[in-house]
Amino acid sequence: VALQSVALWPALAAPRGGAFAGIALGSRRAAVGSAGGAAAAAAAGAGSPEAASAAAAAAASSGGTNRPVRGHQTTGYSNPKGLGPLEDAVGRQVGVTALTGKSVALYFAGAWCPMCQAFTPKLKEFMGKHPEKAVVFVSSDFSEDAFVTHRAALGADWLSVPFGSEALFRLKAQHRAWGMREASVFGGDRRSGLPTLVVVDPVIGDELKLLDAESKGPRVLGEW
């Protein structure tokens, strides 16, 4: 359903246990890092983006903590809590040193998410007024093409976690932030859906503050 106005936010931001709670996950729920779980998800929803995401999650963790889904350079993933190497707006690899001296927030979002579509322009406007802050995009898109298109629509100076990387799945699990369409991968034990911002220490990965944009909308930016 297309989002007509940001004013519709309260109606879309269903509380935990609300409208989404009745969605039957059943056999589509798969544990991160379990090849069997990914196979079950694929069997329950073969060909769906959710099944593809489940298979990717299993591939990311089945070969060890430093193995990404695609053949991406893994230098920097040795710290299990750090962000690892990042990418700029055109896909060039960037180190976390690019974030030195800034307040950094992970932005969990997917282009398919109506609330993300409404929130992103507000976040871009906010970031334009706060050069002392930085955003790192954590994608919930279901294909690399969708990710690249989504990334191009974000801030030109925003960084992103590489699509399909081990770090992408680890950060979602660590901060328990993902979309309901990803429940087959991560389950239902989440703190926040999409969109979500988590302010972090980019070097050691410690969480400093959760900004629940799914529930609060653009007004949550006042808490950052």
Image (tube, rainbow, N blue to C red):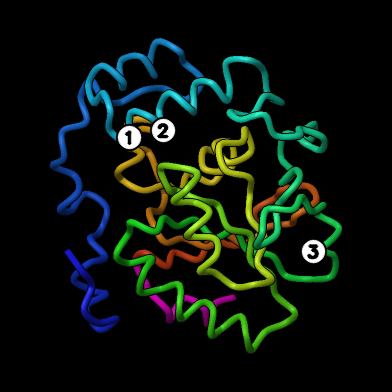
**Amino acid on which disc 2 is placed:** Ser
- Residue 114 is left or right of residue 212, and the answer is left
User: Residue furthest toward the top?
Assistant: 36
The circle drawn on residue 42 is: none
Say above or below: 94 vs 220.
Answer: above
Where residue 94 appears, as percent x and y from the top left, is 79, 54
| Location of residue 81 (image quadrant) | top right
Amino acid type at mark 1: Glu
173 magenta-colored? no
Q: Which residue is mark 2?
A: 53
- Tell which residue pokes out farthest to the bottom in this image: 129
Write down the residue under mark 1.
Answer: 50
Quadrant of the image occupied by residue 55? top left
Q: CA distance from mark 3 to mark 1?
A: 32 Å
Residue indicated by mark 3: 99
Tell me whether the residue at label 2 lies in contact with that at label 1, contact meaning CB atoms closer than 8 angstroms.
yes
